Image (cartoon, coloured by chain):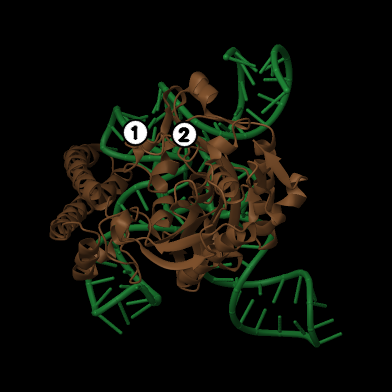
Amino acid sequence: MIDIRWIRERPAELKDALIRRNMDPAIVDVLVRLDEERRAIRTLAEDKRAEQKALGREIAKLEGDERERALEQASKLSEDVSSLTTEADAADAIFLARFAPLPNPPHESVPMGDGEEDNVEISRFGDPTSFEFEPKDHLELGTGIIDTERGAKVSGARFGYLLGDAVFMEFALVRFALDRLSAAGFTPVVPPVLVREEALFGTGFFPDDDNQVYQIPADDLYLVGTSEVPLAAYHADEILAEADLPLRYAGFSTCFRREAGAAGRDTRGILRVHQFDKVEMFSFCDPDKSWEEHEFLFSQEESLIQELGIPYRVVNVCTGDLGASAAKKYDVEAWMPAQQKFREITSCSNTTDYQARRLKVRFKGEKGNQLVHTLNGTAVAVGRMLIAIMENNQRADGTVAVPEALVPYTGFEVFAG
RNA sequence: GGAGAGGUGGCCGAGCGGUCGAAGGCGCUCGCCUGCUAAGCGAGUAGGGGGUUAAUAAGCCUCCUCGAGGGUUCAAAUCCCUCCCUCUCCGCCA
């Protein structure tokens, strides 16, 4: 949710922001009017309520006829208050239904664009891997350690089993990432993966993306698609100490995604699956420092991938491809030799105060209580990183070289599918 | 899963239909005082919305919030219902 002052004080700027996101700015004029109306009605309701409360205090002191007459009057007031309050609540609801979905205005450095194809490449690391033989994809390389056939038999399409050395690779990647992040001041976290609706609303996944989320109706819970959700909600309704900022967490969790609307896309292998494990960075920081913090998180992200030696490029995600909550987002796209393409492997967003406002995460600063800014970034998405390592580090004999940085964690230097 | 107890301000804790956003204590902030420290004295100290204002300065007015949501009543922290959470005991379980 954005700051309501955009509506009251900077409607023209808000219109510009909406235009940049390819949205109709006319909504702003509607919201300005709805906001004025709801405040007018609320004032009426509150005045009436104040009157009622004052009379109520009188009644306590009165006796006999005087009391009877006052009671009669109070009864009438009570009805007025009740109907005005109902009206005011309705006006609030109408306003909020239109206001809450407004996306975070993009940062000035975000390129304009309609979709993924307009993302702007801003840097590259390494060169696309070249081979003296025909490179295989991760499924061919991992016939014995990645089993999507039996995954489909047991759970359906887009599920898989990791076995043997793939499992040791997973735990190596996770421990590697946690070690690096822990050294950089992040607190490792294993959060719940089942959350209440409020956590999804607070992080902006609801109502927009609710078809991407698995539901557990019997218990009114939802499986998270990323640990960003439980990490962001961790400090919901709290007032943090300014001295504690930034609060940085590295969450490890399984992630569940329905991938609705992705039918037919990336059906081979484990690039796009319903369940994968991920280490995610999350930061609560001072609003004046969130752009620095964004660069900091991103530098962590890059250094992990660099240490693993995967060629990649960085894109600045354009306005049309930015989620509602992000004001700016960098994607890292790793080189995937089998596809001869760069594919998204991590991403890093500054959601400014968009989530903090919904989740009510504040800090006590010199200017009183203020909303923090929240940021998130992928450290390691295990499945995709595993693909990137296997495909880029494969050798003519079909074995895969473990990145040097990972060897202390795997205990082996080479593995075979 | 069964039985019971309970959820009040940063913390502890009183209040159980009106004068209560809430006694008292602790903590914290500011000031006073005392060679320093400690102690002592005084004042202040929940969050959010709306209005007033040049102002997201102060002040003032007002509404909402005593786990959440409904209800009863002229009036609810206090009474009733539903839900959530915590604790104790029993059962089960990794």
Query: Which residue appears at 24% of the width and 46% of the height?
Result: A97
Residues under numbered marks 1 and 2 in contact, where contact means CB atoms less than 8 Å apart:
no
Query: Which residue appears at 30% of the width and 60% of the height?
Result: A118
Q: Residue B65's quadrant in the figure?
A: top left
Q: Which mark is residue A274?
A: 2
Q: Which chain is brown?
A: A
Q: Give the crowd class for mark 1: few <14, some 14-19, many >=20 residues within 10 Å.
A: few
Q: Chain of mark 1?
A: A
Residue closest to the far front: A132
Q: Amino acid at mark 2?
A: His
Query: Which residue appears at 69% of the width and 33% of the height?
Result: A164
Q: Amino acid at mark 1?
A: Ala
Residue A198 percent coordinates (x, y) = 42, 41
Q: Which mark is residue A213?
A: none
Q: Chain of mark 2?
A: A
Residue B62 percent coordinates (x, y) = 29, 57
Q: Secondary structure at mark 1?
A: loop
Q: Secondary structure at mark 2?
A: loop
In the image, which is nearer the foreground, mark 1 or mark 2? 1
Q: Quadrant of the N terminus of chain A?
A: bottom left
Residue A73 percent coordinates (x, y) = 17, 41
Give the left or right position of residue A235, taking residue B35 as reference. left
Can you identify the residue that label 1 sits on? Answer: A263
